[in-house]
Image (cartoon, helix red, strand yellow):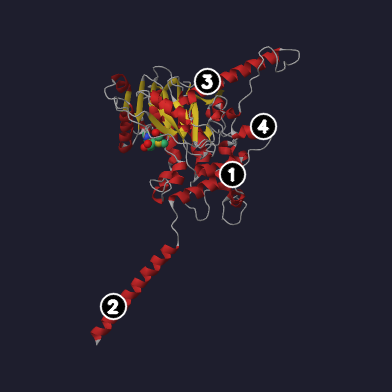
Amino acid sequence: MIGLTVTRSKILTRNSVLLNVLKRHRKRNREPKVTNSQRALEYFDIAYAPVYGTRWPSVRLALLSKPKYVAVLNNFASYNETVERFQTLGAWDIGKKYSAIRERMRMRQEQNQTVSHDQGEAPDEATATGKFVRPSLVELDDDELAARARLEPKGRYPEEYRQRAVAQSPDTDEFEVDVTSRVIEPSEAGSSLLMDYVPATRLKGLENWMEEADVFTHASQGDQEIGVTVVKQEEPIDFPKMLKIFAFEKGNISDFPQPRSDPQLRVLDHYAMDGASLLPVLALDVNPGDRVLDMCAAPGGKSLLVLQTLLPGLLVSNDVSEGRVKRIRSILKQYVPRGMSSIENMTVVTQKNGCLFREAEEYDKVLVDVPCLTDRHSLMEDDNSIFETSRTKERLKLPELQSQLLVSALQAVRPGGTVVYSTCTLSPLQNDGVVHLALSKIWQETTIECSIVDMSQAVQPLSFLYRFGSNLGLRYGQVVLPSLLTNFGPMYFAKIKRIR
Ligand code: SAM
């Protein structure tokens, strides 16, 4: 009898345990799991909507849509047939298009000078040269077109997103918001740094968020206080003659075919990449014989671009990760024919921590394309996401790592040389914020002197291809905003010249 009672009570206990497990399982299944990409979208909606304003809905839509690529022809393959194929598809040779646009700009400038020298009446369209050169509409980006129509660039996107952004503003009662840490007013920061907004730090239910306010206490000085001068680059950015890049015009969402293998040389004929990746490399302004360091190079897209200019005397492609260094080697193998000793001897692949890159003043040009929130990847992929909860610490430490890498890059470049800092995020903190942080460290802790090169004017002739973010209050760099018309980016890049 006793034995029976014990067995019965054992069964009852086991059943109740099973019941609890079942309940928990059902509950878990009822509550949809928050994916990494959803977490990223939530973050971007709150952090970017106030910064990018009416432009955010269209940028958001583009980020969630199919990205656009350009095709970089491989100079080490025979590519004539590829050029013909791309032309038949209607793709543009960007280099050619760019020089035609520069020529038009030059002629327009000359005409303006003639008109301003003429004290009398401005000549009409039928004067000596006969033709006035008008800017073609393809040379104007969306924001310029809107300005011509005397309109604010308007979001072409549903009202619900605007409302959502408003709902998430600090005035709302829905969240418990620590207003002082969410928004740093220009008056408090002493500048319009990071476009005046800092993403929320202590929103209820979002405890993972960056404690960005701490970083801002360092980043709040003005340019003079960190010894930075700004020089404007008046001349349009240079497009190396040997770079052969094809792209489809704005609004054309055609794809390039898969790369083909050159049967003799056993290398691929072209490399497809986000068109915005071209800009940091153009900003480097590689000259013949330059010693170039690509500090965070894997998988190797930008290194390949540098190589395709056929300009550097030395290219060091570095990455901290062993697995990713293998990817650089594999890309080089796919695009540089075996036994081409002149190229093999000038390309070096290294695996070092860029923060500890102790090669002072070794390079003429340094590209530091840092790990970041990788906005597009974070929105499109759940795997290998920086928004994975287990990677929260790593994500929070990104600005610190980025600024260390930039400081190290400024130490590795020779006086007179150039460093380009780039990211593929729209995060103001990881862009202008990190540049400011690194420059103030350089000012306080070293004898190095730097100046920022303002590229805003220099990149304008490339508006036929890109949507550059204007009037965003950026102090140091330029940003390419994704748009459905031309879905490249995001890409931020800042050019820094080392003076001493
Ligand atoms: N520039 C590359 C391209 O165009 O193909 C993309 C670079 S990716 C945005 C950033 C890279 O930085 C990653 O490959 C990552 O392994 C590397 N990285 C992260 N921390 C680093 C460090 N401390 N030193 C050097 N590389 C680092």
| Mark 3 or mark 2: whose residue is earlier in sequence | 2
Q: Nearer the viewer, mark 3 or mark 2?
A: 3
Q: Nearer the viewer, residue 485 or 64?
A: 485
Spot occupied by residue 10 in the image (x, y as percentages of width and height)? 28, 78
Q: In the rendering, which numbered label is found on residue 99?
A: 3
Residue 372 sits in which quadrant?
A: top left
* Mark 1 surroundings: few (<14), some (14-19) or many (≥20) residues within 10 A: many
Question: In the image, what residue type sits under mark 1?
Answer: Pro
Question: In the image, what residue type sits under mark 2?
Answer: Lys
Q: In the rendering, which numbered label is found on residue 148?
A: 4
Which residue: 58% across, 38% down? 195
Q: Quadrant of the N terminus?
A: bottom left
The answer to whether marks 1 and 3 mark residues whose Cβ atoms lie closer than 8 Å is no
Q: Nearer the viewer, mark 2 or mark 4?
A: 4
Q: CA distance from mark 2 to mark 4?
A: 81 Å
Q: CA distance from mark 1 to mark 4?
A: 25 Å
Q: CA distance from mark 2 to mark 1?
A: 60 Å
Q: In the rendering, which numbered label is found on residue 151?
A: none
Question: In the image, what residue type sits under mark 4?
Answer: Arg
The relative height of residue 389 versus residue 325 in the rendered view (above or below) is below
Question: Is residue 92 in view?
Answer: yes
Q: In the rendering, which numbered label is found on residue 10?
A: 2
Q: Nearer the viewer, residue 141 or 455?
A: 141
